[in-house]
Image: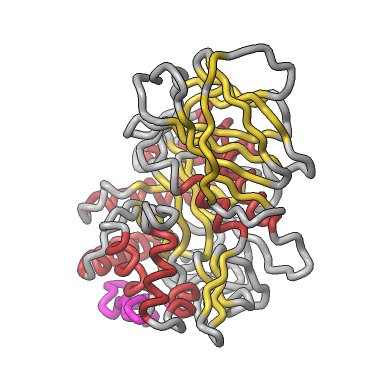
Amino acid sequence: MASGQTKIKMVLSAKASRDRLSEKPPLAFVPAKEFDGPSVLIDPRPRFQTIEGFGGAFTESAAVVLKTLPPAQRLQVLREYFDPKKGIGYNVGRVPMNSSDFSIGNWACDDVPGDVQLKHFSIERDRQATIPMIKAAQKIADGKIKLFASPWSPPAWMKTNGEMNHGGKLKPQYRRVWANYYCRFFKEFAGEGIKFWGLTVQNEPEANQPFDSCIWSGAEERDFVRDHLGPALHKAGLSYLKLMIWDHNRDIMVERAKAVYDDPRASKYVWGTAFHWYNGDHFDNVRKVHDAWPDKKLFFTEGCVRMDPKADQWEIGERYAKSIIKDLNNWATGWTDWNMILDINGGPRHVPGPLSAPILIDSLHKKAIKVSSFYYMGHFSKFIRPGAVRIMAAASKEELESTAFLNTDGTIAAVIMNRSAKAIRFALKYEGKMSMVKLPARAITTLLFPAGRR
């Protein structure tokens, strides 16, 4: 970093103000001096994982709700997400394969019983709303969206319970067909000009849900990857796809990673472990998976909160940021929200239980409403760009939660959050210099250091 009065850009969102990703007066670094209060140290020399990116899910519900807006407003909502300069720069998108709980009913790409040749396979349902949404987003992002697919359930005819809901398992005789089904899905989307970056084996494989779900044990997932899905992807010329296992909560992710990674023939096909945030925090388990298998990646693939008008709405954003900071500091390479868009009732969803989303659409009044999670996501996605490398960020006070990254252009983005009820004045320390920062109560800031010699 150049000597002298280096200016640090400060972007702030705070509950008790109108600041929402607002640029504040710049900060200046001066030679360090004695200060006995809290501090945050940024050190660019220790280098950790490289970031893939941040984003959300292209669910059928999100796409259907988006279509209720006039065309110009649809594009504006997508710009808010995917424009790296005027929006918050999303570059990751999750796409359900077949229906999910946020679809307009159960459906599959091949609902014809016994069609083991997949002659009736079709993505026509996706063409109605989801594919147009993806294409519009890709255009805004100049094609730079890393899409990954996740199935919630195979078609009902492939399952032991004869339905897509309420768990059940894939019948053993359909394992080869199901593996080919993934490949066909990617090929059909490629025909639409949409190329995927990755996939997960199964969304939440331990959850017997009243909606689309399918149960897999660790051994079953291992064997399916080793004997069917991995070989099928390679045979179809899709070995470049990043294959992720688990795709469920942090609580037993070490156990589930071990089930696959301890088998070299299965492990060779797997890029990393996907995980969610439900059923407790368990952030240490994210690090334990990295420590045990440092050659494998970690990727957060889903988090959301239930819609509750009586709850503290600002707390939604704080929960997002807490998870993002902790996951990144424990070696996650990316973080994906669930629905990007829902209506103001938290739907539509083909089972009860409304959820929140960073942007809610009032279809009656043709209005898009941003909630706190949108701004908190933006403090990461807009400023920590793909290819950024995590560096050291260490706070002396528990109330200051922090992480920092060195971007490929040489800039540093440090994200610091204060979830406490009081403002905190702290010293930002960097290479023998310091800057005094006052972070309001219930606030988050991204501090941007200019490019320099590092």
Q: Position of residue 38 (x, y in %)?
A: 71, 24
Q: Residue at x 78, y 68 (%)?
A: 310
Is 34 above or below relative to 227?
A: above
Q: Is residue 431 left or right of residue 78?
A: right
Q: Nearer the viewer, residue 354 or 274?
A: 354
Magenta stretch: dominant secondary structure:
loop
Q: Residue at x 65, y 53 (%)?
A: 278
Identify the image quadrant of residue 136. Answer: bottom left
Q: Position of residue 3 (x, y in %)?
A: 42, 16
Q: Position of residue 57 (x, y in %)?
A: 46, 62
Q: Is residue 111 visible?
A: yes
Q: Is residue 345 left or right of residue 71?
A: right
Identify the image quadrant of residue 32. Answer: top right
Q: Is residue 274 visible?
A: no
Q: Position of residue 111 (x, y in %)?
A: 39, 80
Extreme bottom residue here? 364
Q: Is residue 43 left or right of residue 208?
A: left
Is 185 above or below relative to 248?
A: below
Q: Nearer the viewer, residue 101 or 227?
A: 101
Q: Nearer the viewer, residue 396 or 6?
A: 6
Magenta extent: 105-128
Query: Could you tell me which quadrant the N terminus lies in?
Result: top left
